Image (spheres, grey):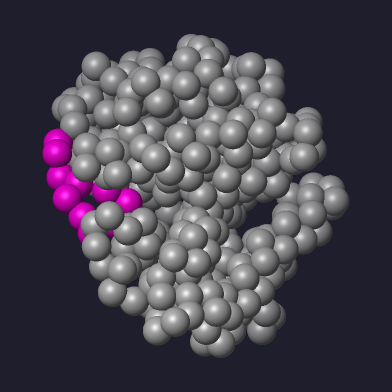
Amino acid sequence: MNEPAQDARVRDAVDRQEALRALSPEIEQARRVPASLAAELAQAGHYRMLVPASLGGGEVHPRVFVDVLRALGRGDGATAWTVMTGATTGLLSAYLPREGATELFSDPASVPAGVFAPMGRAIPVDGGYRFGGRWPFTSGVENASVRLGGGLVFEGDKPRLLPSGEPEIRSFFVRADQSLVIDTWKTSGLRGTGSHDMVVEDIFVPDSHTACVFTNAPTESGPLYRFPLFGLLALGVSAVGLGIARASLDELGELATRKKRGRRSLAETELAQLRMAEAEGELRAAEALIGATIDDVWTGEGALDARDRASLRLAATHAARVAARVVDAAYHLGGGASIYESSPLQRHFRDVHTMTQHIMVNEISLKPVGRVLFGLPTDLAQL
């Protein structure tokens, strides 16, 4: 497993930043990442970062995952977001039966997308399930060849229960031609993610293309798969936000040397200097906390305990909130120039505040973290 500084995916993401920055307005207007760009990202291995090496995937160090998303997000937040959701969808390949994982994830050109939420309905039949449903927020779905929808398993009119008494929730993988895309993604931010609704209408899904990721252990034993699925997802969401925040400081730096306030440039004013220094310090600290937290839990053995899980979520949610503050500071310093469509600052502002609405990093995500820190009994399912 490559360390972050040595990984070709990180270098590729950094090399793409200027091209992505130039393409951002087009991506936003089209409300999707171009199919040609998605194909390039697939060939570079970005969507398969979390797929096991035994399937030809990256099985990367979590810091590689974070660094790739930060770098892509610095170029274009929407592109980074679709890579993040595609990669975390690919993570579920480590929970599938070997036959299904090979069929779905052995092709380097495959592009995954999907939604974990159990908004579908599955009926057990011989060899698999009859399955259907509708899922919003399916980022990058138009480019996806492998699509995921979460669902409840039913027996008759009632959900099937596990021995714990909880309903059985499974993840179901389908081909692109087995699903429909409904154009619903008309939003304030992250418009280029194309996070439309996906619909599946009563199809057969074989057992080998489903996994019970919330209750079953992964079939792979590598250290990456000790990490909780939602912990990696939260890190990915916040990493995109950190990339957007870095892009906003890049833009502010360029704007501040051009924009005049009286005889001085914006960069020469004390207020701008103070705010820039504060924002840079906050951003570096958030980046460092995520890196240090990953390193702390990576060195252990066995499953992550409650403290480890809480630490990962705390670092991710903190980083998301810092990213929003940094972008806000850059946006407000830009003054009237920030509000024009030609300014990347207004897009960064809309994108980062869309990111903070994600359930993995919103304010309520800190509730189980606080319970763990107080030593209270805590449901770790969402950590």
Above or below, 309 against 300 in this view is below
Residue drawn at (66%, 74%), measured in percent from left and top?
A: 281
- Residue 278 is drawn in which quadrant? bottom right
* Residue at 49% from the left image edge and 60% from the top image edge: 254
Q: Quadrant of residue 328?
A: bottom left
The foreground one among 274 and 97 is 274
Q: Which residues are magenta?
A: 182-195
Q: Quadrant of the N terminus?
A: top right
**As rendered, which of 160 and 360 lies closer to the eye?**
360
Write the residue at 56% across / 23% down.
44
Expressed as whole percent of the image width and height from the top left, the position of residue 304 reads 73, 55
Dominant secondary structure, magenta: loop
- In front here: 244 or 233? 244
Q: Position of residue 67 (x, y in %)?
A: 64, 46
Task: From the viewer's perspective, tell me whether residue 339 is left or right of residue 95.
Answer: left
Q: Is residue 185 magenta?
A: yes
Q: Position of residue 243 (x, y in %)?
A: 53, 54
Residue visible at 22% across and 37% down in the picture: 30
